[in-house]
Image: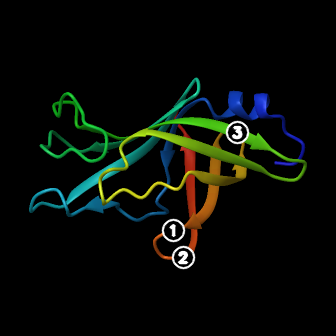
């Protein structure tokens, strides 16, 4: 992240990133009685971030931002503006939440440090406010 410009990093982050759960199958149990397996995507479009969960089929569960349809199996959880703040030796991704964190299940820190950002990998870290530990997320670019 050394000496990358905000403009270049903003260009590099645009697109759809799928969260890598390192071989685990992520699931929700708070959506009815069934266990819902999902894929998590962060979609950077212009100055906005859309965090979505894609389920294996149609569900009647809505987390975070209210969705207009459940038929597509995609649940938009968080919508946010984002900004990249670069320093000489590090860079930060800062969010201004628009909607979606009123759900007590979703905790969304508003400042992340870039560990890696290249053509294929986005790796972020932040202080996790609930457990007072470090939260690290890794994504790979799909488009």
9 and 55: which is toward the camera: 9
Cα distance between the residues tagged 2 and 3: 24 Å
Q: Which residue corresponds to mark 3?
A: 84
How busy is the neighbourhood of tag 3: few (under 14 within 10 Å), some, or many (20 plus)? many
Q: Which image quadrant is residue 9 in?
A: top right
Q: Earlier in the sequence, mark 2 or mark 3?
A: 3
Q: Secondary structure at mark 3?
A: strand
Q: Please, is residue 84 above or below residue 1 in the view? A: above
Q: Which mark is residue 108?
A: none
Instruction: Tell me whether circle 2 and circle 1 mark residues in contact (CB < 8 Å).
Output: yes
How busy is the neighbourhood of tag 1: few (under 14 within 10 Å), some, or many (20 plus)? few
Q: Whole-percent x and y of residue 117?
A: 71, 44
Q: Whole-percent x and y of residue 112?
A: 63, 54
Q: Which residue corresponds to mark 2?
A: 132
123 and 103: which is toward the camera: 103
Q: Which residue corresponds to mark 1?
A: 129
């Amino acid at each position: 992240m050394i000496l990358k410009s905000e403009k270049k990093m903003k260009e590099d982050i645009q697109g759809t990133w799928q969260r890598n759960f390192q071989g685990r199958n992520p699931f929700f149990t708070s959506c009815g009685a069934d266990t819902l397996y999902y894929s998590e995507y962060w979609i950077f479009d212009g100055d906005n971030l859309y965090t979505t969960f894609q389920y294996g089929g149609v569900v009647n569960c809505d987390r975070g931002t209210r969705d207009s349809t459940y038929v597509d199996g995609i649940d938009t959880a968080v919508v946010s503006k984002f900004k990249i703040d670069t320093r000489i030796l590090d860079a930060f991704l800062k969010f201004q939440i628009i909607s979606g964190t009123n759900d007590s299940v979703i905790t969304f820190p508003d400042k992340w440090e870039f560990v890696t950002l290249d053509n294929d990998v986005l790796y972020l870290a932040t202080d996790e406010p609930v457990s007072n530990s470090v939260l690290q997320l890794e994504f790979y670019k799909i488009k």
